[in-house]
Image (spheres, grey):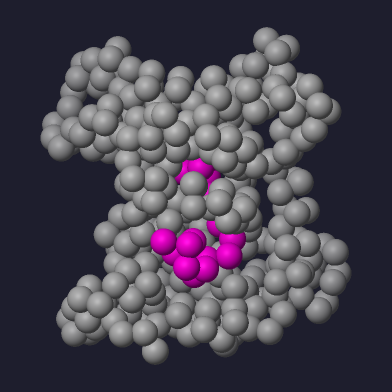
């Protein structure tokens, strides 16, 4: 077994109880799942790309610790925005003290705030717009259709953005994913900035909606991927936050069992959620894992973990442990 590094040794020595102990237990179970030949899906909600999760997630991808990702459209694009416009981001550590007038001043400066970090509209959104439109238009002119993440991959792999790189590219999880052609599903992509921009081109009749593959097609594709990858140890589910990034892909299993009536479909074989939602049976994000048994997503003996904490703190620590840092 690979020797653990200073971070992992610290966690092992000090994280003995409560959420800290769950973090260690879930990390060990994750490693065990991979070591026994299992596959793992990671789902990204919230603003994890703006929180620069790529610093550890990119290495998880490179070391084959994750085989598929489900993420919001915002996480898909914001990792690339950070890649090409990092020096223009503005941190607002006193964000809790901002008045409505202060917030309007940020808007007028083209600074869109995500908690304590402002994304620079001109340098981030517009820098990508020209290049992603080229990918959309080229495909449409050829009569081709792709998923949202595939257009992003094409843009990254074209080299067109390299002149704008402002961080070490090894810290971009999207670049690492593009280089591996890692499978991604992006439910609800339309509500992202790039989704809004694509919609605007369709309204202006410069593009056709059909040039972009849809969420239904993502689910159809995920059905086939799951069927091909769920043998043996099976596919695990590592959920960061809640929302559509997690709810969409986990439903592929009961959909096949209940709606397609395919009765040989394995349950998800590992489950861990990092969540700061209050435990609640009235919300998806706050539901305890056992509730998912009743929905045909997990089995009674599936390893199940919930780390009730801030994902911006917990996810990098868990990834560091899994990577042996």
User: Please, is residue 319 above or below residue 142 in the view?
Assistant: below
Residue 55: x, y in percent? Answer: 34, 54
Query: Does 62 appear in magenta?
Result: yes
Residue depicted at 57% across the width and 40% down the height = 157
User: In this orientation, does residue 216 appear?
Assistant: yes
Residue 52 horizontal/vertical position (percent): 33, 48
Q: Is 78 on the left-hand or right-hand side of 269?
A: left
Judge by depth and name the residue closer to the eye, 98 or 325.
325
Give the quadrant of the C terminus: bottom left
* Picture layout, residue 109 above or below residue 96: above
- Which residue is painted at 63% across and 83% down in the image? 233
Query: Where is residue 68 drawn, in percent x and y?
Result: 59, 60
Q: Viewed as shown, does residue 88 lie left or right of 300?
A: left
Q: Which residues are magenta?
A: 59-76
Residue 22 within the magenta-colored segment of the rendering: no
Identify whether 288 is placed above or below 167: below
18 and 179: which one is in front? 179
Which of the 4 quarters of the picture holds residue 146?
top right
88 on left or right of 61: left
Image label count: 0
Up-down relation of residue 318 to residue 140 (above or below): below
* Residue at horizontal 39 percent and vertical 89 percent from the top: 1
* One can see residue 152 in this view: no
Question: Given the current orientation, which residue lies at the most extreme top position?
Answer: 204
Position of residue 49 measured from the top left corner of the image (x, y, whole percent): 40, 46
Q: Residue at x 31, y 85 (%)?
A: 3
């Amino acid at each position: 077994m690979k020797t653990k590094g200073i971070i992992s040794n610290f966690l092992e020595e000090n994280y003995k109880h409560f959420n800290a102990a769950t973090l260690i237990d879930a990390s060990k179970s994750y490693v065990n799942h991979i070591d026994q030949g299992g596959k793992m899906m990671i789902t990204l909600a919230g603003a994890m790309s703006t929180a620069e999760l790529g610093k550890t997630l990119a290495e998880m991808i490179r070391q084959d610790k994750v085989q598929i990702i489900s993420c919001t459209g915002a996480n898909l694009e914001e990792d690339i925005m950070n890649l090409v416009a990092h020096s223009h981001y503005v941190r607002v550590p006193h964000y809790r003290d901002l008045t409505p007038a202060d917030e309007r001043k940020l808007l007028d400066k083209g600074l869109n705030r995500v908690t304590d970090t402002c994304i620079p509209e001109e340098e981030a959104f517009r820098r990508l717009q020209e290049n992603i439109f080229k990918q959309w238009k080229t495909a449409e002119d050829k009569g081709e259709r792709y998923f949202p993440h595939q257009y992003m991959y094409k843009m990254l792999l074209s080299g067109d953005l390299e002149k704008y790189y402002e961080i070490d590219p090894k810290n971009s999880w999207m670049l690492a994913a593009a280089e591996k052609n890692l499978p991604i599903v992006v439910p609800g992509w339309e509500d992202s900035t790039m989704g809004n921009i694509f919609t605007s081109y369709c309204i202006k009749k410069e593009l056709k909606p059909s040039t972009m593959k849809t969420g239904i097609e993502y689910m159809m594709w995920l059905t086939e991927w799951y069927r091909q990858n769920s043998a043996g140890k099976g596919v695990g589910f590592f959920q960061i936050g809640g929302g559509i990034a997690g709810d969409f892909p986990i439903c592929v299993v009961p959909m096949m069992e209940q709606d397609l009536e395919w009765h040989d479909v394995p349950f998800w074989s590992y489950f861990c959620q990092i969540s700061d939602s209050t435990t609640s049976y009235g919300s998806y994000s706050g539901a305890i894992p056992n509730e998912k048994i009743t929905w045909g997503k997990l089995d009674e003996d599936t390893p199940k973990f919930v780390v009730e904490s801030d994902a911006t703190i917990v996810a990098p620590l868990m990834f560091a442990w899994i990577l042996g840092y």
